[in-house]
Image: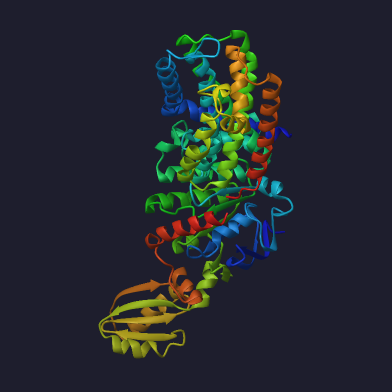
């Protein structure tokens, strides 16, 4: 039984714009599932369909075992969402925002107060709870929204670009909260991001999505091995000799010789470092340094889509355009 | 209606109360504007006499109460645009509550605020020496509720169609201001040319203003039961239209 089960999910806007193209995804209970792709790839549209805010043009999806089209009320009760754009009332305090949420989700008075304290502690906002949200920093707002998404004990939490526009430090803190609540509360998390590092750090499985299609879906480590080998960069004095010696080893796939370093392509790089030293010892060659580089999701992304993920800064205006365009359509 | 929906209506209402009390500028603007109108026009036209030697400020006061209720209600309805722009509407729409509950909560909140402001203007009017019939306040309250239901719903309908606040300014100037000017709030319907009278009789606010004036000052231009029937049927049908318009809106 899957918490999220989508089959051939498709969304066409205005009979012409194909935003999501035949997506099929199954997410297991307790999993952190990452949706990685550039802006405009169809990530948010997919979340909107799964959270019942948009009706699919074609295909079918169930969340928590309920059909998103036929039983939207039941789906809404079992999911929590943190939207890409902030969705807080700035004129209310943090606590009042949580109380509002608790009431529209029908929590009883006792569980309301208890839960507000719990989630505030989880995201470390208990000291600022009675301040107006308009005085919160970007990171605090994000944390409050995550706390709010958890208020009604959802089975699944949707996080749409949870760290977009935040500084590195805040981003790391939010990652820690996400990992903690996945571990402590056992919540299944469906997250979208266009940050490689984020998808890699958080997700148990990653789907790379581009132009509304899933290009590839697997564990980050499997994706890596699909793309290729690790690279050991070796600093050496007599590189030519070391190179010819290494070429005799069957675990070495390829060597590229630069002036005084070698790039050695191998599988499972960390396990080959001792062997590399042994070879060097045999010929009395000193090794200056060894650097191990694993293919990142960036390389994987490049491999599957033939292009690099665009940088965030270049994208803000584009995102605005997409948002505005989307608004006009409605 | 389920208890979750009732709870939702209550908290939507509560949110508007809190926001209103925290927004000092809105509070001041809503009191100062009708006060200016009432004091400046009321005393400015003090040498004029209307129908049976009525002082102009007495004639004007019910109209200014209506204006204040209408402005504040429309604003409450249209504020949904703000919620959409600031993203908060998504938080409400994704909750497991019915769209009707959202419309009712928003309407009750807006109406409560509008009536509070109507009463503030009423009190100001009494201080300015307007001769208010105290026994008429309760029936006048009913008319104020009907006006506010009408105007909040109108605001919601506008909000469900509008994308941003620039268009709202246009609507205010092209729709709401003429509605107010042609409602008999500033001058009596009996004294205008026939073509204008026809337009005024097509304006729902005319009946609201007349009803309010009848109860507060004691002068009806239109039979009270007609005022009442028009006000109640229009406010209820607009409430329905508002609910339908809102239920179709996607974020």
Q: Quick check: can you spot residue B11?
A: no
Q: Quick check: can you spot residue A1?
A: yes
Where is residue B236 drawn, in percent x and y?
69, 32
Answer with left or right where residue A217 lies relative to residue A270. Answer: right
Report how many numbered discs are placed on residues in the image: 0
Answer with left or right where residue B99 lies relative to residue B195. Answer: right
Q: Is residue B63 above or below residue A49?
A: above
Answer with left or right where residue A257 lies relative to residue A322. Answer: left
Which residue sits at x=66%, y=56%? A55
Where is residue B59 drawn, in percent x and y?
52, 16
Toward the viewer: B213 or B137? B213
Where is residue B32 drawn, in percent x and y?
42, 22
Where is residue B37 drawn, in percent x and y?
43, 22
Which residue sits at x=44%, y=80%? A266
Toward the viewer: A182 or B175? B175
Answer with left or right where residue A198 lies relative to residue A184. Answer: left
In which quarter of the view is residue A263 placed?
A: bottom left
Toward the viewer: A107 or B197? B197
Toward the viewer: B163 or A139? B163
Q: Is residue A253 above or below residue B71?
A: below
Q: Is residue A67 above or below residue B209?
A: below
Report the coloring of the rendering: rainbow
Q: What is the quadrant of the N terminus of chain B in the image?
A: top right
């Amino acid at each position: 039984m899957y918490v999220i089960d989508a089959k051939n999910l498709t969304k066409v806007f205005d009979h012409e714009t194909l935003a999501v193209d035949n997506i099929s995804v199954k997410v297991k209970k307790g999993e952190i599932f990452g949706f990685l792709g550039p802006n405009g790839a169809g990530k948010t549209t997919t979340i909107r369909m799964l959270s019942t805010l948009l009706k699919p043009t074609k295909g079918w999806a169930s969340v928590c075992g309920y059909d998103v089209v036929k039983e939207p009320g039941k789906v809404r009760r079992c999911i929590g969402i943190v939207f890409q754009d902030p969705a807080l009332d700035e004129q209310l305090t943090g606590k009042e925002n949580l109380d509002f949420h608790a009431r529209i989700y029908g929590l009883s008075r006792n569980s309301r107060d208890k839960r507000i304290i719990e989630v505030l502690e989880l995201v470390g906002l208990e000291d600022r709870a009675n301040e107006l949200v308009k005085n919160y920093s970007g990171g605090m707002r994000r944390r409050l929204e995550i706390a709010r998404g958890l208020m009604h004990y959802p089975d699944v939490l949707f996080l749409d670009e949870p760290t977009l526009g935040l500084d590195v430090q805040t981003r790391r803190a939010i990652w820690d909260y996400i990992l903690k609540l996945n571990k402590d509360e056992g919540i299944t998390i469906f997250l979208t991001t266009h940050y490689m590092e984020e998808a890699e750090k958080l997700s148990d499985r990653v789907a790379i999505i581009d132009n509304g299609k899933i290009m590839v879906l697997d564990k980050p480590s499997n994706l890596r091995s699909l793309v290729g080998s690790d690279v050991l960069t070796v600093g050496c004095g007599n590189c030519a000799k070391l190179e010819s010696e290494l070429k005799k080893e069957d675990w070495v796939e390829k060597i590229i010789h630069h002036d005084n370093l070698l790039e050695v392509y191998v599988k499972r790089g960390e396990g080959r470092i001792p062997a590399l030293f042994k070879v060097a010892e045999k010929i009395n060659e000193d090794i200056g340094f060894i650097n191990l580089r694993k293919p990142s999701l960036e390389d994987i992304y490049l491999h599957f889509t033939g292009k690099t993920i665009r940088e965030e800064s270049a994208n803000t205006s584009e995102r605005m355009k997409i948002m505005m365009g989307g608004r006009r359509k409605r | 209606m389920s208890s979750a929906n009732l709870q939702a209506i209550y908290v939507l209402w509560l949110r508007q109360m809190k926001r209103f009390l925290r927004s000092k500028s809105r509070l001041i603007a809503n009191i100062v504007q009708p006060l200016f109108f009432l004091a400046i026009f009321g005393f400015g036209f003090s040498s004029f006499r209307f129908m049976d030697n009525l002082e102009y400020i007495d004639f004007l006061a019910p109209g200014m109460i209506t204006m204040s209720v209408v402005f504040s209600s429309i604003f409450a309805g249209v504020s949904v645009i703000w919620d959409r722009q600031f993203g908060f509407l998504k938080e409400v729409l994704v909750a497991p509550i019915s769209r009707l509950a959202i419309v009712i909560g928003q309407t009750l909140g807006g109406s409560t605020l509008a009536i509070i402001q109507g009463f503030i203007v009423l009190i100001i009017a009494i201080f300015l020496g307007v001769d208010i019939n105290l026994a008429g306040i309760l029936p006048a309250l009913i008319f104020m509720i009907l006006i506010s239901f009408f105007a909040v719903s109108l605001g919601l309908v506008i909000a469900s169609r509008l994308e941003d606040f620039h268009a709202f300014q246009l609507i205010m100037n092209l729709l709401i201001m003429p509605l107010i000017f042609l409602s008999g709030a500033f001058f009596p319907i009996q004294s205008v040319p026939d073509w204008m009278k026809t337009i005024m009789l097509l304006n729902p606010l005319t009946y609201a203003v007349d009803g309010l004036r009848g109860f507060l000052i004691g002068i009806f231009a239109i039979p009270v039961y007609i005022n009442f029937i028009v006000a109640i049927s229009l406010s209820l049908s607009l409430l329905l239209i508002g609910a339908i318009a809102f239920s179709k809106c996607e974020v």
